[in-house]
Image (spheres, helix red, strand yellow):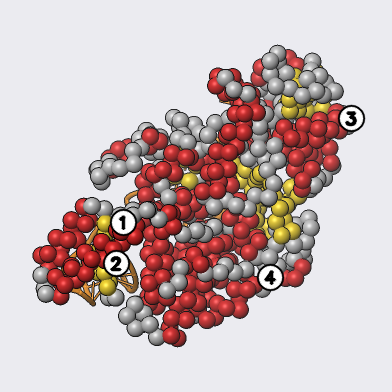
Amino acid sequence: METKQTAAGPDSLPAIEVYSTLSRTKGPLDTVTPGHVGMYLCGPTVYKPSHIGHMVGPVIFDTVKRHLVYSGYGVTWVVNITDVDDKIIAESTTRGTTMAALAEEMTADYLANLACLGVTGIDEMPKATDHIGTIIAFIEGLVAKGCAYASDGDVYFDVTRDTDYGKLTNRSVEQMQGEGGSTADRKRSAADFALWKQAKPGEPSWESPWGPGRPGWHIECSAMSKAILGETFDIHGGGLDLVFPHHENEIAQSESLHDRPMARVWMHNGLMQAGGAAGKVGGRPREAGQPDEAADAAAQAATKISKSTGAEPFKTLLARHRPEAIRLLLISTHYRSPIHFGEEPLRESAKAMEAFERLFARFARIGGKAFHSLPGRTRKAGDAAVAAAGPEAVQLRAKFLAAMDDDFNTAIAVAALFDFVRTVNKYIDQHALETKKPPAELAGLEARMLVLRELTGVLGLFLEPPAAETGGEADEGLVGKLMELVIEIRANARANKDFATADLVRNRLGEAGVVLEDRPDGTGWSRKP
RNA sequence: GGCUCCGUAGCCAAGUGGCUAAGGCAGCGGAUGGCAAAUCCGCCAUCGUCGGUUCGACUCCGACCGGAGCCUCCA
């Protein structure tokens, strides 16, 4: 149904609609360079282990990139690392280490977490401390243009010289006459913000035309995005909490210096919300279905996670929940909406996700192929082959792609995938593929799974086999043999209508954490998730 | 106080000025199955409240109630 053609797209790239915070409307992604997208995401300040909230943006923009690349665009994705900052200095002091060492440690933690979630598309991760020269040059340019002024070793941006200051968040300089913070006496206007901060004794510092100091918060993004992506690039993203003052100030800096738009589109993701009163943060892994509904109902006050009492490190969260379930949870909601986070949503997400994995396992039994070994496809390559997957697949794929083209609506895309799984299961049921396996229908099944592989790949889901399958405990071979034996003995009992014994075996195995499933083609076993 | 945004089934969550208001979790009924699990089929909402615009609104406007974010270097 989509035959739209944008002026920009060479080679008839699909048109992608994107909402911009700046224009407050959705519009076609019209890239600076036809066919190529430059996008910049504000990354973390590395002073503590990252928590779930830090993962939202990367997962969303990773999905954005996947869809763009899948659709034929070239993409350069930049995520900065803020490795010089007051909080890092403070934390390193209390830990008795250096800012650089702490930043390095926390950056490693961040990267490891991203890898777990399948965030693999980042092309460049510039660090502020690697770009001090770039930053200083940027500030000098602003000072030379009269947009910034030095004051007592600091340098401030003069918001009164920026006529459209506040356009991103609909604020005017006049309505922001606050007290100006601790450095009010050095600023001309309360709304002015620091580009360069003079070092206090003992603090890490760099030489500059204004004396030893370090960059302000906002300037690194302006300087580094320019250095890597250019004065105007396509997409600038971040959490909604960064819109003001961070992105407003980035715009002020960059556009004052360059006299041209900084980014074509400003994309902001909703914030992770943690249930308030119930404080699920320290929730224990196991609890035998307690009726904690009352407690949950009482806990309405949702607040963003960074404000809740100590968001737990992402690493410990991973000990309890599969990364696939976390990623699915993050993309089950439209990216601009807040995400309700907690043990319960996580468990539901895991439950939902297992429907996919059961189908993968079913396919492996029938077709003898691992879902994860199927080749991924690009949008174009898929077009030719979807017909073989049947009309429902064609229709659901179209729904999926239309949703993704429309401001990356992953919620609808995910829904299409659930529908897809149902149609494939139905196909297997209707043709009794588990017992009969006629070649034509087998090929039809594989064609369907190929489409599923193609689309889950766009969302960055199910890229790797579950750890349990590959991890391979040392005794798996022995356990497998024993289970084979147990199942065979139980099968004999069932054949003899000795259901008491058969059920006893199944129940006792269940208590031991092993699930038996009697299927048309035999009995299978698995470890309880 | 200023600026954004949200309020859809038991819970989570898409969406549209007018065909049957996605999907997930939970629940109910059914098919299959010795039972269980899985799978499939079906059921389960009139869209916070009150007005207005319109031939027609859940979707547009206003008011109100309720909630969230930002205005404090928190993604």
The answer to whether B58 appears left or right of A257 in the picture is left
- Of the numbered discs 3 and 4, the one sitting upstream in the chain is 4
The answer to whether A467 appears left or right of A430 in the picture is right
Q: Amino acid at mark 3?
A: Ala
The nearer-to-camera label among 2 and 3 is 2
The residue that appears at 78% across and 61% down in the rendered structure is A34
The residue that appears at 81% across and 19% down in the rendered structure is A211
Q: Is residue A163 visible?
A: no
Can you tell which mark lies on residue A4? 4
Can you tell which mark lies on residue A144? 3
Can you tell which mark lies on residue A236? none
> On the same chain: label 1 and label 3?
yes
**Alpha carbon distance from label 1 to label 3:** 67 Å
Q: Which residue is mark 1?
A: A527
User: Chain letter of disc 3?
Assistant: A
Q: Are marks 1 and 3 in contact (CB under 8 Å)?
A: no
Q: Secondary structure at mark 4?
A: loop
The nearer-to-camera label among 1 and 3 is 1
Q: Amino acid at mark 2?
A: Gly
**Alpha carbon distance from label 1 to label 2:** 11 Å
Badge 3: how crowded within 10 Å, few (<14), some, or many (20+)?
Answer: few
Above or below for B32 versus A407: below
- Locate the N terminus of chain A and report the quarter of the image it occupies: bottom right
Residue found at the far right of this picture = A144
> On the same chain: label 2 and label 3?
yes
The residue that appears at 76% across and 35% down in the rendered structure is A131
Badge 2: how crowded within 10 Å, few (<14), some, or many (20+)?
Answer: few
**Residue A165 occupies quadrant:** top right
Q: Which residue is mark 2?
A: A524
